[in-house]
Image (cartoon, grey):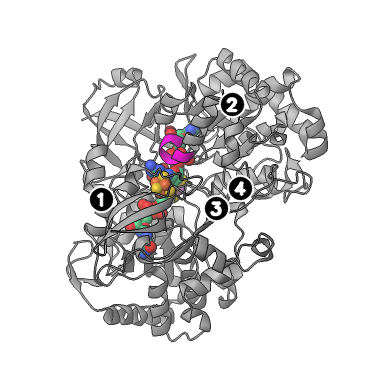
Amino acid sequence: MEIKYSVCPHDCPDTCALKVEVEDGKIVKVAGDPSHTVTKGVICEKVRAYPERIYGNRILQPMRRAGKKGGGKFEIISWNDAVDEIAKHWKELISKYGSESILPYSYGGTEGIINKASMDRRLFNKIGAAALDRTICSAAGSLGYQLAYGESKGVNPLDSVNAKLIIFWGINALETNMHQALLAEAARKNGAKIIAIDVHRNKTAKWADDFYMILPGSDGALALGIAHIILRDDLEDKVFLEKYSFGFDEFCKKAEEYPPDKVAGITGLSKERIEYLAKLYAETKPSFLRIGNGLQHHKNGGINTWLISLLPALTGVWQDKGGGALKSNSGYFPLNEQALKRPDLLKKTVRTVNMVQLGKALCELKNPPIMSLYVYNSNPAVVAPNQNLVIKGLAREDLFTVVHEQTVTDTAKWADIILPATTSFEHSDLYVSYWHTFIQWADPVIPPLGEAKPNIEVFKLIADALGFNDECFLETEENIAYQAIDLPYWKEKGITFEKLKKERFIKIETEDYPFKFDKLNTSSGKIDFKSKKAAACGISEVPQYNPINYYYDIQKSVFNKGNTASNPNYPLTFVSPPNHFFLNSSFAGVSSLKEKAVEPFLEINPHDAEVRGIKDGDLVKVENERGGLSIKAKVLNSVLPGVVVSAGLWWKDDYVNGSGVNALTPDDLSDIGGGATFFSSQVEVKKI
Ligand SMILES: Nc1nc2c(c(=O)[nH]1)N[C@H]1C(S)=C(S)[C@@H](COP(=O)(O)OP(=O)(O)OC[C@H]3O[C@@H](n4cnc5c(=O)[nH]c(N)nc54)[C@H](O)[C@@H]3O)O[C@H]1N2
Ligand SMILES: Nc1nc2c(c(=O)[nH]1)N[C@H]1C(S)=C(S)[C@@H](COP(=O)(O)OP(=O)(O)OC[C@H]3O[C@@H](n4cnc5c(=O)[nH]c(N)nc54)[C@H](O)[C@@H]3O)O[C@H]1N2
Ligand code: SF4
Ligand SMILES: [Mo]
């Protein structure tokens, strides 16, 4: 038995270092690397099940569609034939429709820098293909946070053990950022209190010391309400604000409009609870806010994230070690994007397609229409909103679809050509995190299975077949990794590729204060409570609360209308967060994890169930103007009246009528950043 090391490639903040046991050339066990300060030998049950994912149901050879589109019949072909066919089709499409008729589609299948965003970008730039705006995950919230602080940098999570109050806001950390939960547990042993703010009583809420269940999209009002109380009671840090903030007076006027009784009506909390939370937040230091992605998957997700991000500036808690906020720490990892992606290879301005609106792009774009889709690192048939429109697009007879995958996903079923992809254990890559501050390198642990190839090798083959002979299409993973960190930032820290390859992971030393608060990359250079950039993005210069849609007023037991016109026939807000046992739709094909997840279900409040004659365990239809989902109801107090929740992202066949949660979600864009609005979904639920 041999021990080898790797890195978890999945789109998860923890980016764990892995210890892998190999027997007779086969991976028999995947565990956490005990020598990594953050992973500490502990990983989630998904990745512990990896041997099943590596050796079960893999695509091992290139395949060509044999029967009708979407029929699931494929014949094995050689790599040569597959690549020639792609090149031939693309050449024809380029001459007939232009290069922008080709659309790449990728997201977070692997977070390895090289197989995520290097050779692919070079190739599609060289082709002049349509550009993809990769907004599906965190675009709105990242921009919201950056309006306040100018970049994606926050508290180093290792420092969060010093906090005395930890608030998980719109993040189900126990399931989606487990090592942050472990660090919070350590802080709790030192006397910290843990609070969760969410729209349903998830695992994190049950584990926290206190839980605030609020209505979807009402976070901005809650943040303003907290600010109102802090200002009313003179609890803000005036010296810090004087020195480091911009537009504070105007923000104060906005906060004045949000007294506790008004905020209670909007959020569903009592005014006493809001008073308690605000005082606790202002008076407990250091306080650490872990801001999640859940709250920003809404129409008002960007502005709400901006509002929440301003709270630690109000209390000045950034000055205490472990105090402040953390939305994303990707700003600690600047990479040489020019070398990685070679934007200079693109010789013209091309159209940009927002990945959230894939269905629209495939079905509605003209001059030229999208005639070929190349999917890698993603499973849009399951993960993209407005699923029925996406499927309608994928079903187009005239669309030439190539899917590079490890397993036959719901998207791959619609492919004309399927290409076999390696897993991260079969190729090398460079990993950064958007949460902790370690940069990591992983060499292959086993050789590729069957004829599987890493993304970069496939893009090199296609480049060659298209006759591109730029040197960048010959580079190896190591060449690319070397260039990726060829920046003064890394040199100053003494981090070179050679050192990284030898040590596997290196911690970036961060300063105690993540920012120089008067030299920020914001509109004013300081912490912006008012921002010209915000106005340029199309929202108010001073952040305000914008309701998303109908919401249920607990006090009055009526639905109030928000400022966005929405259909009163669909009065419930449908929230479909990720599943504990899957990683988005990855692992949703792994039998042992599916068994643990049991089946898809819908959480509905007893009040909403009763008025609809629904009993626990009934099969119900959840529907709106986009589609319908048949699912088992669980009648629980884990959600407020007016809200229904179903954890995704099972593959389509695991739902009774073959439609997943995204059949119901809108492809509307968030207020800023062009982000997804999965959770601003309005539905009605009926007993079947
Ligand atoms: N086990 C597991 N871990 C994962 C993933 C997975 O699929 N499975 N996915 C990974 C990825 S790509 C991401 S982006 C992260 C996402 O992980 P998180 O950042 O935790 O985000 P979500 O799980 O989408 O949503 C978190 C919580 O926000 C709640 N929520 C929804 N709307 C609102 C709202 O308006 N206000 C508030 N306060 N809360 C709201 C949801 O109910 C949910 O409980 O997790 C990563 N980790
Ligand atoms: N309703 C609803 N929808 C959601 C969400 C939600 O909370 N609710 N979450 C959203 C979020 S936050 C995100 S980030 C997206 C995620 O959406 P995706 O990034 O599409 O995530 P996955 O479903 O994990 O699909 C990744 C695919 O890449 C493949 N893959 C892995 N490694 C490689 C590789 O090296 N090469 C190639 N070619 N393929 C590889 C995997 O097998 C897998 O099928 O989903 C979004 N969709
Ligand atoms: S999915 Fe997240 S928690 Fe699980 S091993 Fe990967 S990085 Fe760690
Ligand atoms: Mo995500």
Q: Distance between the residues labelled 4 and 3?
A: 23 Å
- On the image, numbered disc 3 is attached to which residue? 438
Q: What amino acid type should be assigned to the residue bearing mark 2?
A: Leu
Query: Would residue 655 be visible to someone looking at this image?
Result: no
Return the residue at label 1: 589
The first of marks 4 and 3 along the sequence is 4
What residue is disc 4 on? Answer: 143
Q: What element carries label 4?
A: helix
Q: Which mark is residue 447?
A: none
Q: Residues within 10 Å of mark 1 (few under 14, many from 20)?
A: many
Name which of mark 4 and mark 2 comes first in the sequence: 4
Q: What residue type is labelled 1?
A: Gly
Mark 3 CB in 8 Å range of ligand 3? no
* Badge 4 or badge 1: first in the primary sequence: 4
Q: Badge 3: how crowded within 10 Å, few (<14), some, or many (20+)?
A: many
Q: Does the magenta stretch include residue 458?
A: no
Quickly name the residue at label 2: 165
Indicate which label's residue lies in the foreground, 2 or 3.
3
Q: Where is residue 294 in the image (x, y as percent from the top left)?
A: 48, 38
Given the image, on which type of amino acid does mark 3 rest?
A: Phe
| Cα gap from disc 4 to disc 1, whole angstroms | 33 Å
Q: Mark 4 and 1 residues: CB-CB less than 8 Å, in contact?
A: no
Q: What element carries label 1?
A: loop
